[in-house]
Amino acid sequence: MLDNNYDIVEPLASSIVQSLRSIGYSLETAIADIVDNSIAANANQININFIWNKEISYISIQDNGMGMGEEELKVAMRIGSMSPLSTRNSKDLGRFGMGLKTAAFSQCKRLSVMTKKKDEELHTRCWDLDLIEKTGKWSLLKEFKEISDLQIIEQGTIVLLEKLDRLISESYSSVAYNSYLKKVASVEQHLSMVFHRFLEGPNAIQIYINNMLLKPWDPFLVNEMATQELAIEQHYDNDYIIKIQPYILPHHSKISKDTYSYADGPRGWHDQQGFYIYRNRRMLVSGSWLSIFRKEEPYKLARIMIDITSDMDFSWQIDIKKSTARPPKYILDELKRIGKIARDASYKVYYHRGVRLIQNNATQNNDHVWEQIHKHGKVFYKLNRAHPILLKLNDEVDDYKLLNAYLSFIEEYSPFNLVSYTPSLKIEDTNQEKKNYNKVEITEDILSSLKDIIYALKSSGYTGDQILYRLCNSEPFNKYFEQIKALLEEE
């Protein structure tokens, strides 16, 4: 039993609220966190509405899940409604008991919840941050603003966000409105990615945003014939299984333009490469090499699915927003090994699309040195980047970008390839001549080579002006004056 040698020091409600508002949610991660609660409540239909009406604009998230009783609702509205140390249901998407509140407060100053279990009464509760600021007390209101387009049917829950001070500028100008629409579009992309495994399959849930059905974004293109599914591996975190499934996406020549655009994802092909971490099928990390590798062009076809459970939250350092995860040290070597296999496979697809090999008796086992490529009615030759000796060398050099840059030089300066290129462009040539050269379309291969070569020359001590002069006076790079200039400015 405690003696009297202590003080009770209660935190200031207004200060806590302002701290909770600054955890770092974006609009899309906030809405995703609220949708987690609907999925955990076994909802199979979720309706999200973004209503613009200046100062009385609001966001509503309505589901047909199991709903809550009055005591359950009060617990759900409590700050820290459940200890992070508590055992979770295998389907639970939460951990800290903070998601609903912190996600809502990050965007608005008024959070209301209306909920109903089947054949039971309707219950409502509301947090108004202006009231908390005024009174300094955790006063949970029992009211819910009546809005005509929100209706509880037999059962379910409605979450209503009002006073959107963090989302909508008080000017309510056309600029503010357009910014609002862009944020809504970002929410659509984010939810279609994060919940894609819930939006597809025989027991798919339906999510509507402003009455439009959300379509899943599958980062792995599993329905494409040319997608490679590498071997699934299983590893253990204590008694729990980690499943790892690498996918190698097709080269763009093997898929339609629409599919290529679709696979671009929210951040683009280059940034979507890497590991995808899922917790109970819900995406946490969408394309990251987890500081094991760098993102580079030849590896953009590699996307690797990692499945963990909620029992691994602490070992994988899942954050409160469920937007980051850090794998434990013991599995980093395995991820590095699997990642290298996937990157090597991506490299081969990236450099070998649409290629007809120069066949002879020595080419049956990938021993050939050169490959013949047809582009725009002309024949070019590229080194076989999958040659066993070259792959071994690539593994052993300290800076493989320098090696790749040198190999690119060899390819571009091959006497046969030079025959197809145009005369040299001097830097002192007229602007009109530069403009004419700049009309030449640059391919992804050439752009990647240019990046490697610029990196190599900079590593050798050349300045930007010296690099520009050398490349623009060299075949075949003289055709890409503006692109080289732009790359140097980016560097």
Image (cartoon, rainbow, N blue to C red):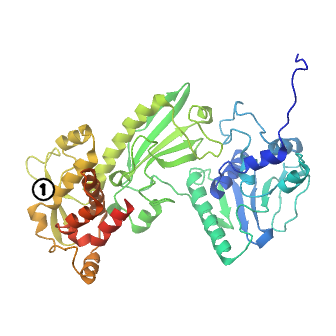
User: Which one is in front, 44 or 280?
Assistant: 280
Tell me where residue 157 appears, x and y as whole percent. Answer: 79, 53
Look at the picture and state if 127 lies above or below 469: above
Look at the picture and state if 103 lies above or below 97: below
Visible in this render: residue 287?
yes
Task: Say which element carries label 1.
Answer: loop
Give left or right: position of 26 versus 336: right
Residue at 27 percent across and 45 percent down: it is: 400
In the picture, the quarter occupied by the C terminus is: bottom left
Residue at far bottom of view: 432
Tell me where residue 424 appears, x and y as whole percent. Answer: 16, 73
Give left or right: position of 12 versus 414: right
Tell me where residue 194 appears, x and y as whole percent. Answer: 58, 52
Look at the picture and state if 338 lies above or below 122: above
Give left or right: position of 282 versus 288: right
Q: The disc labelled 1 sits on which kind of residue? A: Ile
Q: Quadrant of residue 392?
A: top left
Tell me where residue 63 appears, x and y as whole percent. Answer: 75, 55
Residue at 35 percent across and 50 percent down: it is: 299
List the residue tagged with mark 1. Answer: 358
Give left or right: position of 436 versus 418: right
